[in-house]
Image (cartoon, rainbow, N blue to C red):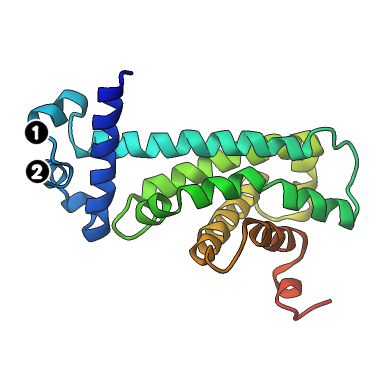
């Protein structure tokens, strides 16, 4: 892709996100994006069929980066072949989110827009799908029998347990990045480690 094409596509994507700050995606017209970007309608249609195609391109860019961060964080569980002690678990839990936290912070504004009421609920669901696939791989690496164990201990299917877990974790991170002026990436990783290694009641100080 040449520099001119990259610049045009980048400006159109930025214009869409800017428009979504002010109004719901379903209300945005191509003319709104043209006005915000300063790019002609002829040029717009040269690259995108409509606003939905542009939104998909924005989301695909972010999801590809999210997937890259998840893959990088997988390294934290490589070589684990035993049941972890509490101290080991906390250390792994801190390391397992290093690249993901960096991704969330880098894309904070975009993520807040896309997951807002003006955004696209399907985007959040896509993030969950990526997380589900990755965490299933990590669980398999750490304990090939994890599904059998979950089936014994839970009354709902293992895949559903993992899905609920991923929804909660992503929501926690989306909340944490709102406080990036007060919390460092290390603070966020420690918080997530605590969230992962303790029950909610323990985390709130209501149980030992």
Element carrying mark 2: helix
Distance CA(mark 2)–CA(mark 1):
7 Å
Q: Give the residue displayed 70% in from the left and 70% down from the top.
A: 200
Vertical position of residue 61 compared to residue 150: above or below: above
Q: Is residue 157 visible?
A: no
For this orientation, the residue located farthest to the bottom is 206
Q: Which residue is mark 2?
A: 31
Q: Is any part of residue 169 visible from this angle? A: yes
Where residue 15 sits, quadrant-wise, is top left
Question: Which of 87 and 201 lies nearest the eye of the viewer?
Answer: 87
Q: Which residue is mark 1?
A: 41
Image coordinates for residue 42, horizontal then vertical, percent: 8, 28
Identify the residue shown where x is 88% and y is 57%: 86
Of the pair 50 and 19, the residue shown nearer to us:
19
Residue at left 91%, top 53%? 85
Q: Which quadrant: the N terminus?
A: top left
Say whether residue 50 is left or right of residue 21: left
| Within-10-Å neighbours for mark 1: few <14, some 14–19, many 20+ | few
**Horizontal and vertical percent for residue 65?**
50, 36
């Amino acid at each position: 892709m040449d520099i001119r094409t990259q610049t045009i596509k980048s400006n159109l994507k930025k214009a869409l996100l800017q428009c979504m700050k002010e109004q719901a995606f379903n209300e945005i017209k191509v003319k709104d994006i043209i006005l915000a970007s300063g790019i002609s309608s002829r040029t717009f249609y040269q690259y995108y069929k409509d606003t939905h195609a542009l939104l998909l391109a924005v989301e695909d860019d972010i999801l590809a980066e999210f997937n890259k961060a998840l893959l990088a964080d997988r390294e934290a569980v490589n070589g684990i072949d035993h049941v972890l002690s509490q101290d080991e678990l906390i250390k792994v839990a801190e390391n397992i989110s290093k690249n993901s936290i960096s991704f969330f912070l880098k894309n904070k504004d975009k993520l807040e827009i896309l997951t807002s009421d003006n955004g696209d609920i399907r985007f959040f669901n896509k993030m969950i799908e990526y997380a589900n696939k990755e965490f299933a791989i990590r669980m398999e690496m750490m304990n090939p029998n994890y599904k059998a164990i979950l089936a014994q201990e839970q009354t709902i299917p293992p895949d559903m347990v993992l899905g609920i877990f991923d929804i909660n974790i992503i929501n926690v991170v989306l909340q944490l990045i709102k406080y990036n002026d007060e919390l460092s990436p290390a603070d966020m990783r420690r918080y997530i480690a605590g969230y992962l290694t303790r029950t909610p009641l323990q985390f709130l100080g209501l149980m030992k």
